[in-house]
Amino acid sequence: MMYRLEPQPHEWIDRSAPIEFSFEDRPCRGYAGDTISSALAVSEPYLARSFKYHRPRGILSFANHDSNTLFQVDGVPNVRGDVTPLRSGMRVLAVNTFGGLAHDRGRILDRCARFLPVGFYYKAFHSKRLFPRWERMIRSLTGLGRVTLGAERRLTPKRYAFCDVLVIGAGPSGLGAALAAAAAGARVALVDEAPRLGGASVVSAAERAELDAMIDEVSRSERIAVLTGTVAAGCYADHWVALAEPERMTKMRAQAVVFATGVIEQPAVFRNNDLPGVMLASGAWRLVERHGIAPGRQVTVVAANLEAYVLAHALTARGVRIVAIVDLRAEPESGAEAAACAAAGIKILQRHAPYEALAGAGGGVGALVAAPLDTAGRVDARDRRRLDCDCVLMSVGWAAAAQLLSQAGGVTEFSEPLRQFVPKELPPGLYAAGRLNGVYEYAARSADGRRAGAEAAAHAGFGTAVPASVPRTSRSPSHPFPIFPHPAAKNFVDFDEDLQVKDLENAVQEGFDSSELMKRYSTVGMGPSQGKHSHMNALRILARARGLKVRDLGLTTFRPMYQPMPLKLLAGRSFNVERRTPIDARHGSLGAVWMPAGNWRRPEYYAVAGESREQSIAAEVEAVRARLGLIDVGTLGKIEIHGPDAGALLDRVYAGKYADMKVGTTRYGLMLDESGVIVDDGVIARLGAERFYFTTTTSGSAAVFRELQRWNALWGLDCVLVNVTGHRAAFNFAGPASRDVLAALTDVDLGEAAFPFLAAREGRVAGAPARLMRVGFVGELGYEIHVPASSASTVWQALYEAGLPGGLRPFGVEAQRILRLEKGHLIVSQDTDGLTDPFEANARWAVSMKKPFFVGQRSLRILEARGPRQKLVGIEVLESAQAPKECHLIIDGDAIGGRVTSIARSRVLGKTIGLAMLAPQLAEVGREIRIRADGGELIAARVVKTPFYDPENARQRIGGAA
Amino acid sequence: MRGPVLDVEDGAARLGLKGPRAAEWLEAQGAGVPAGPNRWRRSPFGAAQRFLVARLGHTEFFLEDEEGGTALATVAAALDAAPLGVYPVLHEDFAFQMSGEGVHDALAQVCNVNFAALDLDSQPLVMTLMIGVAVLVVPEGADAARQYRFWCDPTFGPTLSEALGTVVVECGGTIRGVTA
């Protein structure tokens, strides 16, 4: 059982500031400076249940490198106990339990392990019939913390930041790098996940003094910005690094980056190596140094390097009894600490292995059974030796923390002498230092950091001196194969996923024999720790099973995030910059009910007291058909083209002919991509000999403008494009009374002869300079009026007030959709999709194949010869209680014959009408089709001609005969 | 005043020019033109007036009158003659200004340009995105008096200023002008 030591010289806790909190609804106490895990360590026999088998678990790494210490804290799931500071009043609960930590009903699964081998879900859940049952069961069993669906949204800021040299990791090498870069004149950002500088490695007293001196120098440097408590979460192109603080994400852009990310301690793999009390030696050191906690009263150390002896010696000095050091190696450790351990009478079992850990009272470790190793490294279980203890510390080796380096484009290779992946090739501006670089001795790490810092500064333009490189450590601190079989298994490689040695061996046997395949089949490295403690051992198992060396196997891809990341940090403030037309406030005052349209907000309809939504929309439609309506169409894209080649450009990018248009006319335009697919449409007006003005769809303006700019640059035509989408407002003033009402507000002659259907004019409306186009999207006499945004409010109000006595209603998007549907007008991207060409969309009339060239023409020739795969047609629904909806499928026998693209009830026609994309054999006018509606009902409909309403377009020429 | 300040402006006359002869035409009107793209200057115009000339590209300019100025009206009138190779561009931009202590902290939350590192002696013009909205930026002033003028499409103005206002207030700053 862990306990508090006497105050330690460098401890982080404030023993004069106790903190009360609860764990599993029992009162607990810690100190200011404690993390959740350290505070619980001294009072709880275990802290969690494992993911799959619900085995009791305690602290393993105390570095947030495993999922043993995830908690539900005040309703927030999966809080990382190892690194989350303790707060007063915290309510801490274990995750992944059924009935609480102590009485977790899920622990029965530990006895079912033989029925849950690796890949069992691939083999068990292939029945479609049974899958829903399995799905429900798995959903109820899996997952860690519980998401609180009603939790308040937490907005967190994001920011951009800049530095010359970014140093990731603040151990001896990182500190050295920061100091060297700053000394060269660079602005340095020094980042570390820990709340204090100094790193996490075991150091001697003399090294500690040197470290403190470096920390002091860093703290005094004006050129070094220190970001502690900050995770370097991901590295992206061009030296962008995501830095995550508890409540803020920083996107740091650096000229150069030094990776001093160190190494991650790896566990030994033996039976019951997951019992509470079995932990990594580096984690124990952090508990001692930072929190004044002894990892146990009787400790056994499993060793394969010097650090094990340094730690054993340090613990002995603090009064902890070291039961034995079980050294995996044949050669005794040299050095002062090893001699000191021997002198202190510590039993050292050379060339021995941990055979199994045995549980004691309370569920934690009660003993370690050690056994000798033969010359081939195999355990000789006949000569077992029981070592009673309440703690087993594992110090058998390390894996490079190369995740960030790899994300940044660094290439690593496996060093056989060092038994570690080390940097092989680094892109310009990236540098590695310290233990990540294979440099382990304290003084050498600092020197290697200074070398990397100087090089990084030079890359950023500060200084030129490049110190000599520091040689890598010659004796490996990592055991080549710290993995020991046991007939009863439960020797865990991956603590996140409860994966045992046999699981990985079986995966290889079943053919998943590359690191990538094994990962995906067995899920090794796919838990919250992303393989930090399992990846190396999994590679060793794979290599041995295949008779290869580790260096022959590839690493799996490291992707951001390096540590589990709260989604709130990724979401940030969730800025939603919505576009609003200049008369947004007027819409609001008229009762607009808003809807999103692309990135705009538009009135769906205008609510009127006493009317339902449907009644309001119907009344808006009726006003346009019978009297007068006014709609804000300012969301349309609006683009001008000036210059001698303006017509030629339009001829090339639209499917119709435009260069021959007369000034003062408009023409429909259909834009295609190179494959002949419809991508946009609009109305093109010729305002002058070298001046055109045209509209695009609401969502297409930016893309169309960008594409036209690109084409214009490629072709080198003598014309310029201007996007005035936001700078001009536009209204559609439509209905039989529109001409008469508008005439009183404008100096433009609206007479049929002077301003016929499809003409365009410039003049003034309500005193504002305006462009008027007589177009008929809604199928009535009407005028599109385009004015500068600053005049929009005045003009809208003048039109509204002038029309009101004659029964004008403003109308919204829904009414417009019905009105245009009655005319059979398509909406690009609603009635077309990513494969629809003009022949299929019944828009052959808008294409001029005789032109020498336009974008998509060549493809259209091929498509025309091939014939359509589908046809857009009008449909009317026959008698039915239920109205079909958009996207409902048309059923042809037992196959899908098409889909409804638009549908609405037309009051003026007295029936439900729509557009549908049908297989050609179903598209014949008069043919009956069946639409599969909600609930499976088949609704009869008939293919009909379009337009549904006013097929002769007489309504758009009202007054034409006068 | 402590903290960043967001000033939402309105009222100044603005105009754009585009076309292969825009630069020479503008110079012929007596306006000084920045030597290269992505530069700006305050150009003398006539005896007593000046206006801002921002060069957006080799052949594209953005002009803004000083407060109460009438220089652009003269320029616009000259454009009515439809000079060859010069085309007017309607500019009804939403304009605002950010300044004050901590302005760079506020800007860092909404834009990825390192404004603090700009060399203002070269009168740089920045065209970038601010929380996804295209903005034109003119930085002015030295050190603590540094201020930034922004222009963007007017349809983004209301929600962009709301978002900026949130950030500025969180940074301990102040909002002034039409949305204050």
Image (tube, coloured by chain):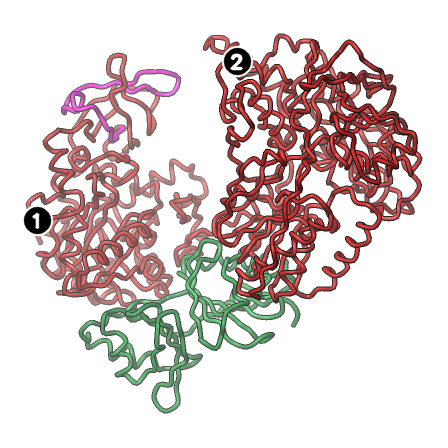
The chain coloured red is A
Kindly identify the amino acid type of the residue bearing the numbered disc 2.
Gln
Residue A27 vs A184, above or below: the answer is above
Viewer can see residue A844: yes
Residue A159, image x, y percentages: 57, 54
Image: magenta residue range: A912-939
Q: In the shown orientation, is residue A588 left or right of residue A172? A: left
**Residue, disc 1:** A852
Secondary structure under the numbered disc 2 in the rendered image: helix
Q: Is residue A206 magenta?
A: no
Which picture quadrant has residue A926?
Answer: top left
Viewer can see residue A831: no
Q: In the shown orientation, is residue A947 left or right of residue A83? A: left
Question: Hue of chain B?
Answer: green
Kindly identify the amino acid type of the residue bearing the numbered disc 1.
Pro
Residue B130, image x, y percentages: 47, 58
The span from disc 2 to disc 1 (Cα, nearest Å) is 64 Å
Name the residue nearer the viewer: A282 or A836.
Answer: A282
Residue A726, image x, y percentages: 35, 58
Question: Which numbered disc, 2 or 1, marks the residue that appears first in the sequence?
Answer: 2
Q: Is residue A916 magenta?
A: yes
Name the disc covering residue A509, or none: 2
